[in-house]
Image (tube, rainbow, N blue to C red):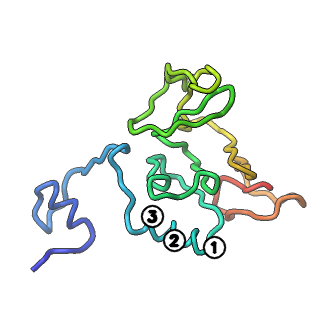
Amino acid sequence: MLGTGPGAWEKKSAKVSRGKKPAYVYVPSEEAIPTYTHMAVLQLYKESHAKFLISQNPDGVHMKSGFPRAALAELHGDTNIERCSKCRQEYLRDFYVEGDDDHLTGSLCEKCGGALIDTIVNFGEVRTIQTQNTRICPRRTPRKLSRTARKAISALSSAVRCE
């Protein structure tokens, strides 16, 4: 009989018997792979049931699933993306991108020679996330939508989708 259920495969890979929880199962972000849920979200997008995805996960798995970058806002950035500080060209890496306090990674843009930065939003930082035709605007307190905004994420969210 095959033991299944929440965490069964993680426990097996950590060599922990069923009933006991592993102390911690760690998978580096560059090794994270899309789950059935990521693929289901992608399918919802492909069938036009979803038009845009806002994610708090910085692991890049939505892009690995095939979700288009133009329809994705990663509120905390992506640990596998470097962006040019001049021309905004993005580079998806197969390694964990780490910048200094100013987010500089030490690499240069192949397109314009500008300094590359990580896209991670660290604790205490506030960034406006710009995607194709969409701007995610941080807000600290609930407020009414302006007349120009057509959609809000939710009252509990810390961002408003501005169009």
Q: Secondary structure at mark 2?
A: helix
From the image, tell me which residue sits under label 2.
Answer: 43
Q: Image check: 131 left or right of 100?
A: right
> Looking at the picture, which amino acid does disc 1 mark?
Ser
> Looking at the picture, which amino acid does disc 2 mark?
Gln
Residue placed most toward the observer, 73 or 115: 115
Q: Marks 3 and 1, how far apart in space?
A: 16 Å
Label 2 close to label 1 by CB (< 8 Å): no
Q: Quadrant of residue 22?
A: bottom left
Does residue 118 show up? yes
From the image, tell me which residue sits under label 3.
Answer: 38
Q: Earlier in the sequence, mark 2 or mark 1?
A: 2
Q: Quadrant of residue 30?
A: top left
**Residue at 22% over, 59% down:** 10
**Residue at 9% over, 80% down:** 1
Q: Which residue of the protein is positioned furthest toward the front in this rendering? A: 111
Q: Which quadrant: the C terminus?
A: bottom right
Q: Marks 2 and 1, how far apart in space?
A: 9 Å
Which numbered disc covers residue 48?
1
Q: Secondary structure at mark 1?
A: loop
Q: Say if 54 sits above or below 58 in the image.
A: below
Q: Marks 2 and 3, how far apart in space?
A: 9 Å
Q: Earlier in the sequence, mark 2 or mark 3?
A: 3
Q: Earlier in the sequence, mark 3 or mark 1?
A: 3
Front position among marks 3 and 1: 1
Front position among marks 2 and 3: 2
Q: Say if 59 sits above or below 105 in the image.
A: below
> Looking at the picture, which amino acid does disc 3 mark?
His
How far across and down, in percent of the image, does residue 108 sit? 55, 21
Residue placed most toward the observer, 43 or 100: 43
**Residue at 46% over, 39% down:** 80
Q: Image check: 94 left or right of 5?
A: right
